[in-house]
Amino acid sequence: DTEVTQTPKHLVMGMTNKKSLKCEQHMGHRAMYWYKQKAKKPPELMFVYSYEKLSINESVPSRFSPECPNSSLLNLHLHALQPEDSALYLCASSQEGIGHGYTFGSGTRLTVV
Amino acid sequence: AQSVTQPDIHITVSEGASLELRCNYSYGATPYLFWYVQSPGQGLQLLLKYFSGDTLVQGIKGFEAEFKRSQSSFNLRKPSVHWSDAAEYFCAVGTSGGYQKVTFGTGTKLQVIP
């Protein structure tokens, strides 16, 4: 299995809703990432998990809450989002050591109404 | 802090023609450099990477890139473009220490015409 699987593919939520994005990989990668990508922009790093511990939080608002229950699974819990949070949310994983590059999922397209 | 510049926002080439996408980086130490490709609405796929060794790197789908330290560049090339190569291409630089913080350039959109 050489894939990163993200669910759901599309999500529409209201500003008072609570929802979660899910990311799963079975490649044995011990680093996992959340990126946010606005239209016609590059991906921007949000969080990095290494060995199931949060190692980088790029000053992301608390309405985004990451969770890494085990080495294969990464969640992003969403609460009280704003319309400007609408974007493509990408999950990625990698082997230990930066030189390996990332394997990305195909993303969750989030629309906040 | 590291940064990446892709000076070309949009490039149009004819199918079968050669391609070169430009990338310049800024980083104090030896950088980790990557090229990724993204089709519309999709995630990113790693084309190739460089950290050390031979400065000409071969990747997937017939792409190659050349690292030139003196010019702080890592340009992507392909000798003959196919219509399926139309996509967004991102150059990225990663830090050599700490956890895997990768910064992406603003991207170059490639259009391929018959």
Image (spheres, coloured by chain):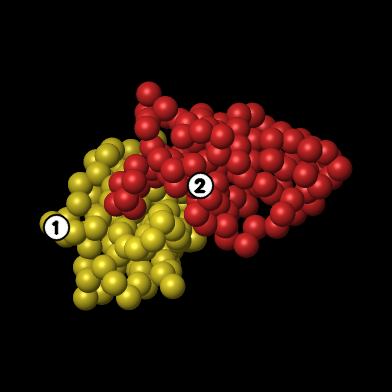
Chain colours: A red, B yellow
- Between B87 and B50, the one nearer to me in the picture: B50
The answer to whether A100 is drawn above or below residue B24 in the figure is: above
Q: In whole angstroms, how far apart are the C-alphas of marks 2 and 1?
A: 32 Å
Image spot of residue B65 (x, y percent) = 24, 55
Q: Amino acid at mark 2?
A: Lys
Q: Position of residue A94 (x, y in %)?
A: 38, 42
Residue named by callout 1: B53
Q: Residue at x 65, y 58 (%)?
A: A60
Q: Which residue is mark 2?
A: A53
Say which residue appears at 32% left-offset and 75% top-offset: B28
Q: Quadrant of residue B8?
A: bottom left
Going by the image, does B54 lie left or right of A14? left
The disc at residue B9 is: none
The x, y position of residue B69, in whole percent, is: 22, 71
The kind of residue tagged 1 is Gly
Which chain contains the residue that carries disc 1?
A: B
Query: Could you tell me if residue A11 is visible in this image?
Result: yes
Crowding around mark 1 (Cα neighbors within 10 Å: few <14, some 14 to 19, many 20+) is few
Left or right: A44 as drawn, with respect to B16: right
